[in-house]
Image: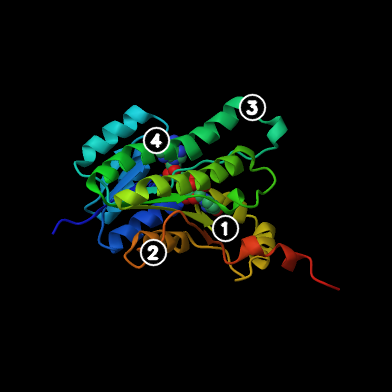
Amino acid sequence: MAKPLALVTGGGNGIGADICRAAHADGYRVAVLDARGDAAQAVASELGDAIALTCDVTDEHAVDAALARLGAVPDLLVNNAGIVKFGHLVDMSVADFRRVLDVDLLGVYILCRAVGRQMRERGSGNIVNISSINAITPSLGTNAYAAAKAGLVNLTKLLALELGPHGVRVNSVSPGFVDGGMSTPVFANPRTREIRTKAVPLRRLGATSDIAQAVLFLASDAAPYITGQDLGVDGGLVHSVLAQVPRD
Ligand SMILES: NC(=O)c1ccc[n+]([C@@H]2O[C@H](COP(=O)([O-])OP(=O)(O)OC[C@H]3O[C@@H](n4cnc5c(N)ncnc54)[C@H](O)[C@@H]3O)[C@@H](O)[C@H]2O)c1
């Protein structure tokens, strides 16, 4: 029997690369899509029977061309590609704000639209979108990123309503502090690392593999009745605000 196909955007680095590895270990044939072709190729080569796709998720024509190269409808789509540009909202340029929205929200929509149509026609599939705890409780300086991720969570719920009757489940995962990917420079600072680790109820930073496991769970037969949900994978961080201000 042919292996199921998983398409992972931003699969060339960090969390996305670990999602590719976990999907491969779970028996998927993996398509690693990334704007950085060399990064996509490196992960695909590591896995062996994977496909590398060089593509910017904000370019709908490039996305269509990449999907055509697959020759099959993905069974799992993971919208993981994302960027952040730190700074105060009122000080940033409109161009920067727009670029973050384009990659983190519009790019997700472009992929969901194209692959969602294919899954709807086939009558099955799973989509998992990677959000962030910033969608729920924005951290100062995350500006357009927090706005885009909040939009992504609602987009996920709406898609679940649209595609549910066609056998397609759509969920999101919201990572907390992850020791890797775009947060690598943040946690290279030992003081930040210590403060942030102590703030997490589970007393450790998340690993990229923690996020990958949650994605594969949502897409698996162990979650057949779960759709339209946002799964926090944050060691309890998002619920810890009152723990940070203890009683005397
Ligand atoms: N690392 C964290 O702490 C953290 C926490 C919460 C959420 N997230 C989310 O997890 C996801 C992955 O983050 P990461 O930390 O692994 O980041 P990363 O920067 O390590 O990897 C992102 C990948 O996406 C690719 N990419 C960027 N723009 C693209 C585009 N326009 N088209 C195609 N590919 C593009 C990059 O080339 C890169 O390989 C993101 O959506 C991010 O918002 C990360």
Residue under label 4, please give it.
Answer: 110
Residue under label 1, please give it.
Answer: 176
Res. 13 visible in picture: no
Nearest to the eye among marks 1 and 2: give it.
2
Q: Identify the residue at image location x=67%, y=67%.
A: 198
Q: Quadrant of the N terminus?
A: bottom left
**Sequence-wise, which precedes: disc 1 or disc 4?**
4
Q: Is residue 198 left or right of residue 149?
A: right
Amino acid under label 1? Gly
Name the image quarter holding residue 187: bottom right
**Sequence-wise, which precedes: disc 1 or disc 3?**
3
- Colour scheme in use: rainbow
**Sequence-wise, which precedes: disc 2 or disc 3?**
3
Residue under label 2, please give it.
Answer: 217
Q: Position of residue 89 (x, y in %)?
A: 69, 35
Label 1, ligand 1: CB separation under 8 Å: yes
Residue under label 3, please give it.
Answer: 93
Res. 64 visible in picture: yes
Amino acid under label 3? Ser
User: Residues under labels 1 and 3: Cα distance?
Assistant: 27 Å
Which secondary structure lies at badge 4?
helix
Cβ–Cβ below 8 Å for labels 1 and 2?
A: no
Nearest to the eye among marks 1 and 4: give it.
4
**Dot 2, how many residues are within 10 Å of its Cα: few (below 14), some (14-19), or many (20+)?**
few
Amino acid under label 2? Phe
Q: Is residue 101 left or right of residue 225?
A: right
User: Residues under labels 3 and 4: Cα distance?
Assistant: 24 Å
